[in-house]
Structures are given as structure tokens and as C-alpha cells.
Amino acid sequence: MSESYAEVIVHDEKDVKGKQLGIVLIAVTMALLLFGAMFQALFLLLGIVMIPVSFTTLKNRYREYEYLLVSDELDIAVVKNKSKRKKLASYTLSELQCMAPVQSHKLDGYHSNPQLQVRDYSSGNPEHTIYSMIFASQGMLQEVKVEPSKAMLDEVKIHHASVVFSD
């Protein structure tokens, strides 16, 4: 099989609750510090304790997913705050059963399976083209949601044309 390569980086936009949590934590911390400075030292102490709690909660909010396709291997990693990289999963394309857009009816037969495990590594933005990749390995069925670039999609089509759909 010929050597193929594609790399895609996708910003995760799904974390709306995390952004709201950050705003609430900052507001609570500021209120405790202000109230504590004006009235009671206990609230000031709680506000000081909330500063590192707020910081550690907010510092991992920016995430990107990185897809790396080399030959017949798809590696997926998460990059937090553009500094920490952690490998999440590795898939062999020879185990690929179906690849189609998430709204495609080609996936209906797989979605009816109760043992299907779903892994979402997409941005979550409905305006982007998100594909579902169905992998079957060791008796386990997994749906992996990704946002491939045109180059990555073409590489997968070249080697696995019978299971890649773009309807």
C-alpha cells in the first residue's frame, strides 16, 4: 500500500457550559473579595481561596483536536491551551466499516445498534461538515465523529473507496 499523509487541526467549540462556568466563577470570586474587604474577613479568605480554584478551572478551556493520518493509521490527539498534547485514540483504517456525513442515512443501520460507542472529536459547529467513521474492532463498534479536510477525505477515499460516502 502506498504511503499517505494528512493532518487536520480542529478547534473545539462545544464547551459552552465551561464558558458560562468561568464567568460565574469569576463573578463569585470578585463578589467574595469585595464583600470580604468591606465587611468580614471570612469572605475575603474565601475569595482568596477561590482565585486558584477559578484559575485551574479556566486554564484548560481552550481545546483543539488533531487528526493525523499516516498510511493506514488515524491518530487523534487533544491539544489544551496550545501547549499540552495528549493522544486520545488510534484507529486502523482497515477496520473502517463506513464513513459518511453525520446526517447520512448510510449510518442508520449502525445507529440502531445499542452497543455502538460514540466518540466526538469534532468542533460541534453545525455549519462545518462533520463525518462519522464507524470502526469495528475486537467485536466492538465505535462511531468516531471528525471534521476531515479535503486532503484527508481524499486519502481515505483512495484506499477505502467502497466504505466512504459523501452524500
Image (cartoon, rainbow, N blue to C red):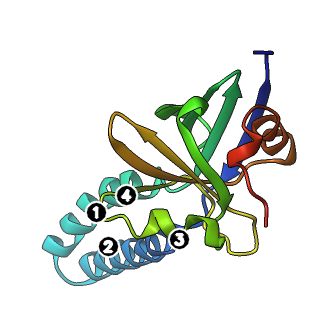
Neighbor class of circle 1 (other Cα within 10 Å; few <14, some 14-19, many 20+) is some
Instruction: Find residue 65 and report its horizontal and vertical position in percent.
Output: 60, 45
| Residue 50 marker | 1
| Helix, strand or loop under label 3 | helix
User: Residue tagged by mark 3?
Assistant: 108
Give the quadrant of the C terminus. bottom right
Give the spatial CA distance, label 3 vs label 4: 12 Å
Comparing labels 3 and 2, the label whose residue is closer to the camera: 3
Residue marked by disc 4: 116
Q: Are marks 4 and 1 in contact (CB under 8 Å)?
A: no
Viewer-side label of 2, 4: 4
Q: Is residue 167 left or right of residue 69?
A: right
Quadrant of the image containing the N terminus: top right
Up the image or down, 86 lies above or below 34; here it is above
Residue 81 can be seen, yes or no: yes
> Closest to the observer: 72 or 149?
72
Q: Are marks 3 and 2 in contact (CB under 8 Å)?
A: no
Residue found at the very far left of the displayed protein? 42
Would you say 135 lies left or right of 122 here?
left
Give the image quarter of residue 32.
bottom left
Tag 1 or tag 4, which sits nearer the N-term? 1
Disc sitting over residue 33 in the figure: 2
Q: Earlier in the sequence, mark 2 or mark 1?
A: 2
First in sequence: mark 1 or mark 3? 1
